[in-house]
Amino acid sequence: MSLVRVYPIHEKVCTVQLEKPISTATFQVVERIQQAILKKFKKDITESTLCYNSATFFLQDEKKIDTYCLQFEQTAIAVLNNQQTLEENKKPTIRIPVCYDISFAPDLAAVSNQLNRSEEEIAKLHSQPKYQVYTIGFVPGFPYMGEVDARLNLPRKKTPTTRVAPGSVAIAGLQTGIYPVEIAGGWHVIGRTPSKLFDKHRENPCLLETGDQVQFYQITKEEFENWNEPACT
Amino acid sequence: MSLLVHKPGLLSTIQDAGREGFRKYGIPAAGPMDLAAARLSQSLCNNNHNQPFIELTLHGAIFEFEKTAVIALTGGGATALLNDTPLPYFRSTVVKAGSILKFCSATFGCRTYLSVQGGFTIQKELGSAATYLPGKLGGIMGRAIKAGDRIEFNLKKQIEENVTGIEVELGNPALYSNHVTIRFTEGPEWSWFSSEEQNLFLHTKWMIHPQSNRMAYQLEGNTLALTQKKELISTAVMPGLIQVTPAGVPYILMADAQTIGGYPRLARIKSEDRTILAQCRPGYQLNFQKI
């Protein structure tokens, strides 16, 4: 099986997808492939996104999509064959406050029951690792991050909650995410952040971007309630 | 002075050419479902393609013009009455101040495009006036049009009444029939489906399920359960792709589709045929033809 698959998803859009499982290492290779393609085909590409093990390119010209697919594949293979050691992620780590108090964590008690671990332990296990933002999607500004400690691995809820509060920090499988707006959702809500994930009036509407590193830190209920976000930039 | 909404109809939203450049934040382009009809309504008003217009779904809307305007209706899904007199689609018309424009039921089609000369005056959000309901972005405070809304026209110059008389017809089969053929090419995961499943997809008379909207059309008629237990890692998706859920139900992604998805993508619909789909309403029968 070849290591990379390049295919159109629209007459002006194509995706380069690695046949590799989700991991920070896979994501970093995809990031490098994206950079190489963007550098080489700068004039032809209007927009590009990343998602776990794939990079997607939006093109000016719809007539040559098959040619682009072939050329992008060659560029991707060249990157894969280049055995340079991976550079350290240079992006700064973004610290996000999370209150794990039960009043902001409607699913924490159930999660604690299912995993047979105390609520404090869950908060500690969740806030310890540094997470990679693998993509933004589902709703504007929702970050998909990983990997969550294997001890917190739970399948999604069978029935989604109709209304998940904005700022809710949730887990599902080995992933963690934050709900930017009130919406139905099937992940287990174990805390809430006072930070605003998405604000269409900010110059950068999203607090997080694909490729960022995230470190959660615990705050108390009082700190949450008195939280003042730094002025919008 | 403006367009006063007496009744919004089933779903009416402000759209423009769409919101490009924000997919990295999880924001799809949105914009009109039927791009060809939307563009034509703009051309009939001498507008550029990016001026805001209204997309109406089926019938029920009643609007009052508080000021004289040149308007054009394209698409389908309703019959229009201007002061109780039938108003033909696909041409531009001068509508006098005080007129009432009403959309009654029709047999075929699904979406009407209403453009006014100069466009509607809508505050852009993230570079576009297009309403993206799931993200509460664009349009009128990110929501659908509702009764009592007053939508201003962008009348900077004298209206050009001489654009009337242009009459154009679009050859969209969904405006004349509830049984249409949609052409597709293989989707990225076409080969994940067995030849039996592929044939089942090709030979089923699919029906558009009532649970269909600007995000996706659900299809009913058969189930295409993947025999191969392979998992797709979530990746970018675009309007026109057909995803198949683990329950075997195909969904056609439409204008407001999310930017990423994790279901295998069986097929990719030919771009021209997405305008046909835009005019298909629940209950329409679809046949898929591979190209």
Image (tube, grey):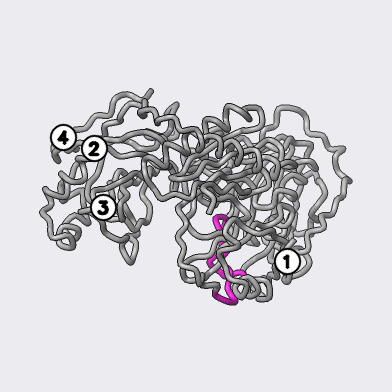
Q: Residue at x 19, y 40 (%)?
A: A128
Whether residue B26 sits left or right of residue B163 in the image: it is left
Q: From mark 1 to mark 4, how far is it between C-alphas?
A: 60 Å
Q: Are marks 1 and 4 on the same chain?
A: no
Q: What stretch of residues is rendered in magenta?
A: B207-223
Residue A78 x/y as whole percent = 56, 35
Residue A55 x/y as whole percent = 52, 41
Q: Which one is nearer the viewer's eye here, A21 or A205?
A: A21
Tell me, yes or no, if residue B7 can be seen here: no
Q: Which residue is mark 3?
A: A189
Q: Indicate which disc, 4 or 2, sits on the residue closer to the N terminus.
A: 2
Q: From mark 3 to mark 2, how far is it between C-alphas?
A: 15 Å
Q: Which residue is mark 1?
A: B289
Up-down: is B48 above or below A167?
above
Q: From mark 3 to mark 1, how far is it between C-alphas?
A: 44 Å
Q: Which residue is mark 2?
A: A216
Q: Residue at x 61, y 75 (%)?
A: B196
Whether residue B235 sits left or right of residue A162 in the image: it is right
Q: Which one is nearer the viewer's eye here, A190 or B65?
A: A190
Q: Which residue is mark 4?
A: A223
Q: Indicate which disc, 3 or 2, sits on the residue closer to the N terminus.
A: 3
Q: Which one is nearer the viewer's eye here, A198 or B76?
A: A198
Q: Quadrant of residue A172?
A: bottom left
Up-down: is A151 above or below A67?
below
Type of amino acid at the residue the image marks with label 3: Val
Q: Residue at x 74, y 68 (%)?
A: B180
The subunit letter for the residue under badge 4 reads A
Residue A84 x/y as whole percent = 44, 29
Q: Which tag is nearer the camera, tag 3 or tag 2?
A: 2
Q: From mark 4 to mark 2, how far is it between C-alphas?
A: 15 Å
